[in-house]
Amino acid sequence: MGGSEQKFVNEAFETNWIAPLGPNVDGFENDIQHYLGNNSQVAVLSSGTAAIHIALQLLGVSKGDEVLCQSFTFSASANPILYQGATPVFIDSEKDTWNMSPELLEIAIRDRIEKYKKPKAIIAVHLYGMPYKADDINAIARKYEIPVVEDSAEALGSTYHNQACGTLSDMGILSFNGNKIITTSGGGALITKSLEQKNKAVFLSTQARDHAPHYEHSSVGFNYRMSNVLAGIGRGQMEVLDARVAARRHNYNFYKAHLSKYDAISFLDEPEGFYSNRWLTCVITESFELREHIRLTLLEEGIESRPLWKPMHMQPVFKDCLHFTDGTSEALFDKGLCLPSGSNLSQDNLESILHIILKSLKYHDKQLF
Ligand SMILES: *Cc1c(COP(=O)(O)O)cnc(C)c1O
């Protein structure tokens, strides 16, 4: 926590706004809108997953529809497709950003139009905070008139040609889960381009209650709104967001400065005009064996690191889904490692992590040569 979260939470208690509405909900939404700019309209919800679910409903995704989704992501990007009774079709990544490949996206769209019908939506992800190639993805989406949901759960604070991630495509989502760059313990937001869409999102996420003195419902609703208590945490967290981004980028720069001279390790640089919040620092090692060696050496010292996301087309739950892949995300999963990346890592922490990684690299080299 940053410091002033408690003040906003106390205000909620003192004013008895212990409900999924109130001054903190409004205040948090205003803060996010102000931060993102670009005329964004924000509805804060119970999770990022809920935000994707509401986005798909606003776009009319339903049974029998197909939704094109980045394969290299966390499962929460894809699960809401199934909640709607629709079918995911997975698209592989390209090498510059590790995000959705525009080439494979277009191949998939053409294939689906030819063999089935036009996909109902595209879910692209700014994975690990690195923006996807929004101009290319949007151009293809516009050409075939398919809306894009921008999964910005990991990319609050990232920008693409100076425009905030979350506002680049038709609808964006954010997550404030405990592991994200700022947190409300659990929470999320839907970012829309119009107040009308935002109001519709709020309506659906507060049980779709029609305007009447009694309880009247003409559509299926959800209980997805954010609590005023948690929104208080969010207001406090917005005050430290820029510092969090700076801390995460410092982690990345530290690791890169000390490790990029080794051929066995590589980093994902920002293409021109791309600015990543560096939510997690990820490296690609020369082999699965080296990746595991580094991971297990860190673990012996009580330090956790993790393989990169396992692509959705490799997941048992999605094994029957169609996918358009070329091996890129499979290789990333095979050789990639997320290094310790918390915003609260001290210089001492970073030095000792580095020391252990260097030790394991030396050991590995001896085994090799
Ligand atoms: C965390 C995350 C989500 C889901 O957000 P929750 O708030 O945890 O539901 C969706 N997509 C990606 C890429 C994520 O990392």
Image (cartoon, rainbow, N blue to C red):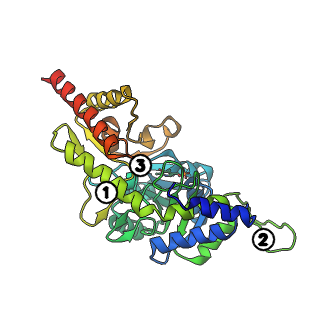
**Which of the marked residues, 1 or 2, is nearer the chain's N terminus?**
1
Asked if the beta carbon under badge 2 is closer than 8 A to the nearest atom of ligand 1, the reply is: no
Q: Residue at x 27, y 38 (%)?
A: 354
Q: Which residue is mark 2?
A: 210
CA–CA distance in space, label 1 to label 2:
44 Å
Q: Position of residue 193 (x, y in %)?
A: 52, 74
Q: Which residue is mark 1?
A: 103
Q: Residue at x 55, y 48 (%)?
A: 79
Question: In the depicted view, which residue is nearer to us: 28 or 322?
Answer: 28
Q: Name the element at disc 2.
A: loop
Question: In the depicted view, which residue is nearer to us: 7 or 115?
Answer: 7
CA–CA distance in space, label 1 to label 3:
39 Å
Q: Does residue 255 appear anywhere in the picture?
A: yes
Q: Which residue is mark 3?
A: 344
Q: Amino acid at mark 1?
A: Glu
Q: Is residue 349 above or below residue 127?
A: above
Neighbour class for label 2 at 10 Å: few (<14), some, many (≥20)?
A: few
